[in-house]
Image (cartoon, grey):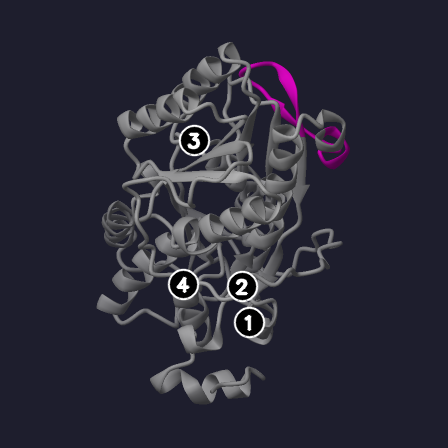
Amino acid sequence: MRSKTLGLIAVGSGLALALSACGANSTGGGGSTTGASGSEGSGPKVGVILPDTKTSARWEGFDKPLLEKALKEAGVTPLIQNAENDPGKFSTIADSFITQGVKVLMIARLSNEGGAAVQKKAKAAGIPTIDYDRLTLGGSADYYVSFDNTKVGELQGQGLVDCLKGKATPNIVQINGGPEDYNATLFKNGADKILKPLYSSGQAKLGGDQWVQKWDNQLGNTIFEQELTRNNGKVDGVLAANDGLASAVITVLKKNGLNGKVPVTGQDADPAALANILRGDQCMTVFKPIAEEAGNAAKIAIALAKNDKASADALATGIEKDPEGKRDVKSVLLSAQTITKANVKVVVDSGFVKATEFCKDDLVAKCKEAGITVG
């Protein structure tokens, strides 16, 4: 078959968005997870369960402080704990919050079954629930706040196409997120909308398509190493579902002297990914302004905590379909933005990441070239 050169596929834009400043954030992924954050106050309590501290720096470094600040400023008492990817701990935290009399429960569930079980208990106790970032399939959440995750996947697929432009019949490996996470399915659906037509037409070849249980970065490293070996070291591009998996892929590429030669996608725009992009080891990431996500979720929680359902409904003007529960969930679905070497500055200017978090050593000059103020 005659080789075909991969061209640019246009995807609808409309991605310009007002980026909210997050203020000073730490991406160390640390922070205490042994107790609820925030001091006890006299205002109504809102319980928040975050999923883990290892798959992404965002949960403890960004979501937690943003939610805590917004809730406190509204006179609401935040109780925020991290389940550390432990289903048993997730359930125990929920039970504790219900016992403590939270007025609202917000969860980023670990599994659909676990999330649905917790929401059932909350409903029995008359507590409204919010699915945060991840929709609980078969659950009973009253509201859902996240990003248009299919569009995020489209941005990743298109980003990889752009990075491979001019490459004849590229061999692509797709490293997807956790199959237990419906978001990962939506990301893949979006990416496949861009990539599958290329595979079908012979403009590109699918060299591997693997899921990574629980978004485990070490497992992602192992899976990609196996895929690279199976493809005899000939991989032209990698669709990695988030920055953690991208980093795992890049580690393998470095071992084989292929970093910078094989474009890799990502998602989350974390400092390590921005550094990888400036070095040329990662071709793009997707910036999801978590300040907007946390802010909208907090506003809905605050309204519900103050018995103002009408205000919560006015915020959740979108609809996300739960195919398992066969219902429509009132939603806030936010936009995301592609980040490449050409616009890394956007993430810094938004306040989401500080330049000092990645503009170090060999990257100082590259940051200045990118228009980022260093020091």
Mark 2 and mark 3 lie on one chain; the one further toward the N terminus is 3
Instruction: Say if mark 4 contacts mark 2, CB within 8 Å.
Output: no
Mark 4 and mark 3 lie on one chain; the one further toward the N terminus is 4
Q: Is residue 146 visible?
A: no
Which residue corresponds to mark 4? Answer: 26
Mark 1 and mark 4 lie on one chain; the one further toward the N terminus is 4
Q: Secondary structure at mark 1?
A: helix
Alpha carbon of mark 4 to alpha carbon of mark 3: how far? 23 Å
Which residue corresponds to mark 3? Answer: 109
Tell me if 139 is positioned left or right of 95 in this view: right
Tell me if 81 is positioned left or right of 131 in this view: left
Q: Is residue 33 above or below residue 343?
A: above
Which residue corresponds to mark 1? Answer: 348
Residue 211: say if magenta.
no
Residue that extends furthest to the front in the rendered view of this protein: 42
Alpha carbon of mark 4 to alpha carbon of mark 2: how far? 10 Å
Instruction: Say if mark 4 contacts mark 3, CB within 8 Å.
Output: no
- The residue carrying pointer 2 sits among few (fewer than 14), some (14 to 19) or many (20 or more) residues within 10 Å by Cα, namely many
Alpha carbon of mark 2 to alpha carbon of mark 1: how far? 6 Å
Nearest to the eye among marks 1 and 4: give it: 4
Q: Secondary structure at mark 4?
A: loop
Instruction: Say if mark 3 contacts mark 1, CB within 8 Å.
Output: no
Instruction: Say if mark 2 contacts mark 1, CB within 8 Å.
Output: yes
Q: What residue appears at the point 51 percent right and 22 percent down from the top-left corner? A: 137
The amino acid on which the numbered mark 2 sits, given as a three-letter code, is Phe
Which residue corresponds to mark 2? Answer: 352
Tell me if 314 is positioned left or right of 27 in this view: right
Magenta-highlighted residues: 313-330
Mark 4 and mark 2 lie on one chain; the one further toward the N terminus is 4
Name the foreground residue: 61 vs 345: 61
